[in-house]
Amino acid sequence: MAQASGSEIPQIKSRIGAILRATSGNFLEQFDFFLFGFYASAIAKAFFPAQNETAALLNAFGVFWLGALMRPVGAIVLGAYIDRIGRRQGLIVTLAIMAIGTVVIAFCPGYETIGIAAPIIVLLGRLLQGFSAGVELGGVSVYLAEIATPGNRGFYTSFQSSSQQVAIFVAAILGYVLSEVMPAETVAAWGWRIPFFIGCLIIPFIFVLRRTLEETPAFLAMKKHPTASEVFASAVANWRIVVLGMMMAVLTTTTFYFVTVYTPTFGKTVLKLSTPDALLVTLLVAVTNFIWNPVGGALSDRIGRKPVLLAIACLALLTAYPALHWLIAAPTFGKMLAVEMMFSFYFGVYSGTMLGALVEVVPAHVRTTCFSLAFALAAGLFGTFTPFASTWLIGRTGDKASPAYWLMCAAALGIIAALAIYRGGETIATRDAVPA
């Protein structure tokens, strides 16, 4: 294998540093999101008292989803800001908003202490997080795409998703340690707040990393940066691209929230596995997600986005229900791990490909806004709704494998979107993009 020359090593280190600084905010977002999902039962009891556990859990997941509905708003407002003012400054602003939401949730007193104000404050914190998250993923993906070396855009953008897996890994380790050193009653009462406090402590470090970002050459090379009104007008004019981009991203968001945020709850409350077992599965899923993302991105750089997107979406459509049905028939740690590894493969390869594809199909002059809006709609309407939808489907049908229907719906949308976007050997961007 050829070795990098002395002159290439500083450039490689510089690009690795840029990737780490850009994706640091993703770490904070997903760290907090995962904790909310894993400790959903404890959070439900602390902030959303109800007559039964299922009702309280639905309330907690409902607030989780309501925060996600702010994503499209953030995508439009903050996306326009980033497309106008620059990638670097925009990513610093999104981090500040996200940090406020994290601190609010971590330090909010429980329902027994301040009554109805508790769920309202938690909801406000989630709305702030959702508003910021609406453009965080898009802003980072666009930044990585614009600093990518030729022929490696898929590989570079895949690290947006890979960085989230590091957050899941760290959060899962913290949860595992807590479950080992604290009684379950203590964790449920107040111990669940400890990982949230740790998240607050790393915020200043992430700010330092973000402040050292450099603006992308692609943005600096633009002769004209659109005004906010021009960005909004162009996003509306290119609505078809945004809708198809959303459909393409749905399989990424639903599988991600299923294998990370919902898996611990599914393992504990549905499969009746132990807390350490559910956490260990989630931890291993984070590791494989981290690996499969760049594999998918690099593979799509070599053979094209369309065949990878279609292959994974078809596999997910055909195997989701049989896999979950096999798991719930006789739940064991090994079977849950095997099924989650399968979904992890689907998620990682598809996500690593989809991110590069979505950057390429949206118009360049409003890239952040359109990418973020498409992804935010996918996450808000489908992805972050996955824990709620899965809980509701099981309660409604009595079939513990019924969350598979949600994943199959996402896969079908992905197939339709890929066929529409890459029809006739050209992308929808080259056929239908409307200029500003």
Image (spheres, grey):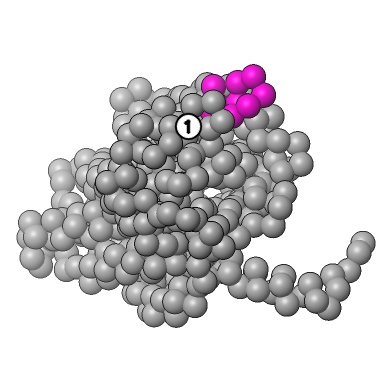
Q: Is residue 284 in view?
A: no
Question: Is residue 144 shown in magenta?
Answer: no
Q: Is residue 342 visible in this depiction of the protein?
A: yes
Amino acid residing under circle 1: Ala
Q: Position of residue 173 (x, y in %)?
A: 52, 66
**Residue 272 image offset from top left, x and y in percent:** 45, 44
Q: Which residues are magenta?
A: 420-428
Q: Write the residue at 83% across / 78% down.
A: 6
What is the crowding at mark 1: few (fewer than 14 residues within 10 Å), some, or many (at least 20)?
Answer: some
Q: Main secondary structure of the magenta part?
A: helix
Q: Residue furthest right?
A: 1
For this view, does 13 lie left or right of residue 138?
right
Q: Position of residue 221 (x, y in %)?
A: 53, 59
Question: Residue placed at 44% from the left, 62% from the top?
Answer: 87
Does the magenta-highlighted stretch encompass residue 421? yes
Instruction: Identify whether 181 is placed above or below 313.
Output: below
Question: Considering the numbered disc 1 on the image, is that residue within a helix, a strand or a loop?
Answer: loop
* Quarter containing the N terminus: bottom right
Name the residue nearer the viewer: 433 or 262: 433
The residue lying toward the viewer, choosing from 333 and 260, is: 260
Task: List the residue tagged with mark 1.
Answer: 433
Q: Nearer the viewer, residue 326 or 93?
A: 93
Residue 223, how many percent across, how many down? 47, 55
- Left or right, 8 with reference to 186: right
Q: How many marks?
A: 1
The quadrant holding residue 51 is top left
Which residue ends up furthest to the front in the rendered image? 223
109 or 219, which is in the foreground? 219
Which quarter of the image is occupied by the C terminus? top left
Asked if 122 appears above or below 382 in the picture, the reply is below
Q: Residue at x 71, y 72 (%)?
A: 11
Q: Residue at x 16, y 51 (%)?
A: 49
